[in-house]
Amino acid sequence: MAMAAVASANATVDKDIIRKKYPVPEKMPTPYEIGYHHADWLKDYKGCTVEYPKYLTLQDVETFEASPLDIPVCAFPKTGTTWMNGIVMGVLANGDRKVYYDAPLEMKSPFLCRCEPEQPVGMRPIDIVKKRPPGRSFFTHLAYQALPESLLRAGSKKVYIWRNPKDTIISEYHFLQAQTRIQFHGDLDEVVDSFVNDRVGFGPFFDHLASFWKHRNDDPNIFFCSFEELKRDFHNVVRRLGKYLGKDLTDEQIQVVHEETDFPKFQSNNLLNKSKAHEQGYLDFNRHQFIRDGSVGQWKKLFTPEMNRKVDAWVEKNMKRPELQGMKLEFEI
């Protein structure tokens, strides 16, 4: 009982510290009229289930004209997309530390499909990306077959990162709680069910992985790595990424990227951690910060035995698919 009381007291202190650092905005954005539990929350787009309001921009995303110089980071949500964005940014800057302190990451590498209903045409991320010259960095959660056709035709250098589905589920659960406008009021069990029943934003999960992985031999313009591989062997993965992007980085340059994108430092850098979204009321850092833990094996702390059984059966079934042969999932390192 004493240990529980100490843990509770520490949790209160930590939450108070966060509230002082991230005060609640005076004016919160209006909740979406189509929230997480609404029948129209997800819509199919070329075999990829896109969530509201992101599917409102898809016609404009389709007309995006890519260049061979563009670098899209592609990933299922909560599998390391923002981390990889920061890494790519450092690689392209040849390990120059200043690149992490001159402008917000979401402005440098926008989310191609992001949409807020009140955003006027011309101010949405897709509009901003279209106006920029070739050599653009941006990210997308669309599956391979749902990407703008020009990304494939132009030979843009795609970077794909995946993560084990158990930690992805945990990260998605925390992210749903932090999104103020979507009105999520479910629990972890509901999120687990959304994954195993293939009703999740930008899913199904294994379809997304397979959509890229099956092209690993016929599309030379995809770099593959896993979240867990980056955690375990950062320098070698980033050296390989650098060569793919035409950069021959030194150990010292890779070390700078490692230091600046290490999770505690990433979390404290307001140009990387999306604290602006908290200030505007789109995310609630008093619930969960956008950059949270970054460790492998978080699922062990929160999954019940029944949740784990469900997910294990789902994973086992899907990893037998021919188009996923050779892909490795790591649930701990």
Image (spheres, rainbow, N blue to C red):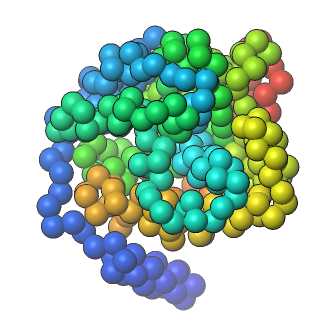
Residue at x 77%, y 58% (from the top left corner):
254
Instruction: Give the answer, above or below, for where 61 lies relative to 175.
Output: above
Residue 214, percent from left and from top: 72, 15
Residue 244, percent from left and from top: 76, 35
Residue 89, percent from left and from top: 60, 50
On the picture, is 100 further left or further right than 237? left
Instruction: Give the answer, above or below, for where 290 lies relative to 184.
Output: below
Query: Toward which corner of the image does residue 186 lie, by quadrant?
Result: top left
Residue at x 76%, y 44% (from the top left corner):
247
Residue 85, percent from left and from top: 57, 46
**Residue 213 shows up from this direction:** yes
Q: Please state which of residues 13 and 317 is positioned toward the viewer in this rendering.
A: 13
Q: Please state which of residues 275 and 239 is positioned toward the viewer in this rendering.
A: 239
Q: Please state which of residues 223 and 170 is positioned toward the viewer in this rendering.
A: 223
On the picture, is 292 further left or further right than 95? left
Residue at x 40%, y 81% (from the top left corner):
17
Q: Please state which of residues 214 and 42 is positioned toward the viewer in this rendering.
A: 214
Query: Toward which corner of the image does residue 321 lie, by quadrant?
Result: top right
**Residue 317 shows up from this direction:** no
